[in-house]
């Protein structure tokens, strides 16, 4: 139908634009997260200020270079635009397909609300796994953030590796549960907390609250695997080891607290930008 086609195209366009804005505004926090996660060592500081100075040294380098926080801007914008287009454009379509095949049995067994939440989460999980195809673009961004080099050098380094998609398994392992939690928790809050339905649409504040809560939950749930994933895909080709080996080595050498590295910057960057994008897409859907 023409109306549906326009709605889908509007959603794709706005998701792409939101992704570009996300990357531009929040890249410094993303770079801080990456550098903290890649730092392999323990802090010797004895107080909070010492820990803070150590973290800032890792993030900004010595001497301090604040401008380096924008390393990887071009691939970051491209990656985020593609990711959000896939994530928020394909998830509703995937949910419709799942609903046509699984909707009735799930509704009979679990009820309408629970079935809708499960379908939303499952559709998000499937789409999240597909996003792993963008891994080479993300690797270029990571290479720039880690080594502070130009995009040309980073692109050559990534494309000359034996397998630019190395780490796609661990990426899917992070994206699938993360996207499930993101979409399921958002839908859960809208239905169970705010009691949204056709006759009682959500306010903007309720959309924001549901989106931000779901984003924060997703980030916290996937924090340990995100650390392992970042270290897996950022390895140099000559010293590559598997994700399980990285997990064991990190646990032995740095302790369990290492799996929370970069969680603060990730919460500060991912939660507001995902909350913004989810809210915008939800509002567009409600007025279309």
Image (cartoon, rainbow, N blue to C red):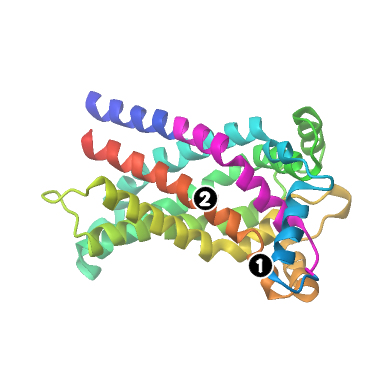
In the rendered image, the vertical position of residue 252 relative to residue 227, given as above or below: below
Q: Which element type, helix, strand or loop, lies under badge 2?
A: helix
Q: Is residue 188 left or right of residue 53?
A: left
Q: Quadrant of residue 111?
A: bottom left
Q: Quadrant of residue 227?
A: bottom right
Does residue 121 appear in the picture of this structure?
no
The quarter in which the C terminus is drawn is top left
Residue in view at x 72 percent, y 40 percent: 66
Estimate the x, y position of residue 104 in percent, counting from the top left.
Answer: 22, 59
Estimate the x, y position of residue 279 in percent, counting from the top left.
Answer: 35, 44
Residue in view at x 76 percent, y 32 percent: 155
Does residue 51 appear in the picture of this structure?
yes
Q: Earlier in the sequence, mark 2 or mark 1?
A: 1
Estimate the x, y position of residue 197 in percent, counting from the top left.
Answer: 16, 53
18 or 54: nearer the viewer: 54
Q: Is residue 131 left or right of residue 62?
A: left
Residue in view at x 35 percent, y 39 percent: 280
Identify the residue position indicated by label 2 in the image.
270
Give the residue at the far right of this rendering. Answer: 238
Q: Is residue 75 left or right of residue 179?
A: right
Residue 259's tag is: 1
Q: Which element type, helix, strand or loop, lies under badge 1?
A: helix
In the rendered image, the vertical position of residue 153 relative to residue 161, given as above or below: above
């Amino acid at each position: 139908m023409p109306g549906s086609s326009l709605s889908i195209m509007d959603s794709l366009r706005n998701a792409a634009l939101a992704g570009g804005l996300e990357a531009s505004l929040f890249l410094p926090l993303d770079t801080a997260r990456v550098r903290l996660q890649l730092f392999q060592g323990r802090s010797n500081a004895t107080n909070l200020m010492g820990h803070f100075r150590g973290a800032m040294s890792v993030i900004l380098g010595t001497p301090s270079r604040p401008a380096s926080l924008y390393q990887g801007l071009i691939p970051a914008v491209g990656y985020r635009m593609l990711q959000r287009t896939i994530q928020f454009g394909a998830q509703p379509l995937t949910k419709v397909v799942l609903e046509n095949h699984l909707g009735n049995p799930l509704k009979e067994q679990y009820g309408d609300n629970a079935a809708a939440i499960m379908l939303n989460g499952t559709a998000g999980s499937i789409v999240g796994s597909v996003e792993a195809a963008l891994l080479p673009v993300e690797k270029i961004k990571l290479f720039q953030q880690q080594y502070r080099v130009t995009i040309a050098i980073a692109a050559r380094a990534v494309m000359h590796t034996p397998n630019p998609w190395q780490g796609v398994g661990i990426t899917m392992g992070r994206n699938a549960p993360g996207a499930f939690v993101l979409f399921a928790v958002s839908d859960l809050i809208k239905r169970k907390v705010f009691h949204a339905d056709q006759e009682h649409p959500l306010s903007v504040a309720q959309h924001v609250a549901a989106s931000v809560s779901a984003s924060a939950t997703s980030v916290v749930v996937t924090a340990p695997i995100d650390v392992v994933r970042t270290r897996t895909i950022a390895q140099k080709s000559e010293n590559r080891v598997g994700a399980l080996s990285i997990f064991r080595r990190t646990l032995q050498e740095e302790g369990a607290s290492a799996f929370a590295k970069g969680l603060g910057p990730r919460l500060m960057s991912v939660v507001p930008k995902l909350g913004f994008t989810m809210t915008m897409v939800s509002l567009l859907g409600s007025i279309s």
